[in-house]
Every structure is written in structure tokens, then in C-alpha cells.
Image (cartoon, rainbow, N blue to C red):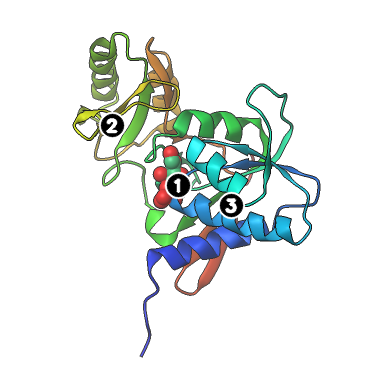
Amino acid sequence: MTTTEPADQLKRRAAEAAVGHVRHGQIIGLGTGSTAKYMVLALGDKVRAGLAIKGVPTSTETAELARSQGIELLNHDQAWQIDVAIDGADQVDPQLNLIKGGGGALLREKIVAAAARQFIVVVDASKRVPALGGAFPLPIEVAVFGWRSTERQIQAVSDAFGYGGTVLLREKDGQPFQTEAGNYILDLHVPRIDDPAGFETRLNEIPGVVETGLFVGRTDILIVGTQQGIEVRQAERR
Ligand code: 5RP
């Protein structure tokens, strides 16, 4: 009889494999979410065994976990030379483009990924999709000021791309969810994003859009935890 491992085991498997890429003396971008949590825990084990690294956390939650694991953190205003950033994703397409931001940390996550020499994405097999969109909405971080006007413009851009869909203000406990930067998140529900690069560019041109959860052409290595083990894909170029 074969048993099916829960998604959590697959996340852990991918995260631990990613930590195998970390070298002594490096500066590591620390992602956010349940998969990234396993990466921080695995790094903590290595640090306790003598590995010297410094971390750049993408959220308060990750910073607290990293500190509890004895991982030294760099301040926000230090000039980082991040060697490797490791983070999860909500969706991954065959070109290794991502939707991120399910946890609302997309702004810091994108800044850290962009600052890293190598960006490693860790997911369980359920995150692989033939095209971005559909089951998972695209998170878009927007300034609180004028957000209803920004929302209208996001809808207009989506319509112009032929994606249509609906924009919903993310809420938590009946209140608008606010990111660590004090912004709102608009979740754009569309059936399919055929042109993630063009869509990301156009959305970022809207005043009021702070950043989108589309990570296009940023993944260097994808590590997928599957029932059979791990699968690794290397991007052809960045
Ligand atoms: C947080 C993120 C996460 O990486 C993404 O939501 C995946 O989370 P998880 O590993 O818990 O499935 O982008 O903003």
C-alpha cells in the first residue's frame, strides 16, 4: 500500500534541499510562509552546527523565527550583498514565473529576490500550474490613499489584457488587511494570465500600485517537493 505524504512534508523536503545550496559566510534572503519556515528551521540547525551566515528577513514573522534559531540578521538600512534568497510561492508556471504574496509579504520578498545573486524557490508539487491565475488570485499591494481609484485602474488594465475578472480588497478580521509597509492588498481574480511580463509592467505603471505579486524571470532554481522526492529545475537564464 502506498501512503500519500501531506503537503507539509513536501514543503519541508524542498526547503531542506534548498538549504544545501547555502555556503559558509553567505548572506541569505529569508522568505516568508509555511515553506520558508522549514528553510529557516533547517538553517538554524546548520548554524548551531557551526555554519556562519547572516540573514535578511522578508517579514517580522520570519525575523522572529530566525532570531529564535540563532540566525544573525542584517538591518533594513544596511547595504546588503545577498548571495542566495530562498522563498516559497503560491503558483509556479512552466517558465518558472511566480505568483507570490499569499502571506502579504510580497513587497519585501520582491526587494530581497531582486537584490540576491541567486533566487531559489521552494514549493510543494501542488503549486505547479500550466498558467498563472485561476485558482489563486494575483495579490497587488497598493497605497491606501486613493485605493478605490487604483482598484478601478487595475480592473481596466485587466480588461484591456482580456483577463477580466474581479478585484477584491483583502480583509482580515473584518478589516482591510494592512501590509508591514502599511499598504492594502487588492487580490485580482482572473482565470488565466497569459502574458505575466507585460501584465506586471503595465500594472506597475499605475500610480498607487506599490508592487505586484508577479515574479517574472526572477527564479534561478526551482525545487519542488513531490511524493517521489525532489525535482530541481534550473532557469535557462535570468
Ligand atoms: C508570502 C508568500 C509565500 O511565499 C507564499 O504565500 C507561499 O506560502 P506557503 O509556503 O505558506 O505556501 O509569497 O507573501
Which of the marked residues, 3 or 2, is nearer the chain's N terminus? 3
Check the picture and name the quadrant holding the C terminus. top right
| Distance from the alpha carbon under mark 1 to that under mark 2 | 18 Å
Name above or below for residue 106 compared with residue 183: below
Looking at the image, how many numbered discs can be counted on the residues? 3
| Distance from the alpha carbon under mark 3 to that under mark 2 | 28 Å
Asked whether disc 3 touches disc 2, contact meaning CB atoms under 8 Å apart, the reply is: no
Which of the marked residues, 1 or 2, is nearer the chain's N terminus? 1
**Quadrant of residue 112 within the rendered picture:** top right
Q: Residue at x 61, y 45 (%)?
A: 67
Instruction: Provide the residue designation for mark 3.
Output: 40
Residue 216 locus on image (x, y percent): 50, 35
86 with respect to 174 (left or right): right
Q: Residue at x 39, y 33 (%)?
A: 195
Q: Nearer the viewer, residue 34 or 198?
A: 34
Does mark 1's beta carbon lie closer than 8 Å to ligand 1?
yes
| Distance from the alpha carbon under mark 3 to that under mark 1 | 10 Å
SS at circle 1: loop
Q: Is residue 197 visible?
A: yes
18 with respect to 60 (left or right): right
Q: Amino acid at mark 3?
A: Val
Instruction: Provide the residue designation for mark 2.
Output: 187
Picture quarter with ligand 1: top left
Residue 76 locus on image (x, y percent): 63, 25
Residue 168 locus on image (x, y percent): 21, 29
Q: Residue at x 72, y 55 (%)?
A: 47
Residue 219 locus on image (x, y percent): 57, 43
**Quadrant of residue 162 within the rendered picture:** top left
Instruction: Provide the residue designation for mark 1.
Output: 33
Asked whether disc 3 touches disc 1, contact meaning CB atoms under 8 Å apart, the reply is: no
Residue mark closest to the camera, 1 vs 2: 1
Name above or below for residue 44 compared with residue 147: below
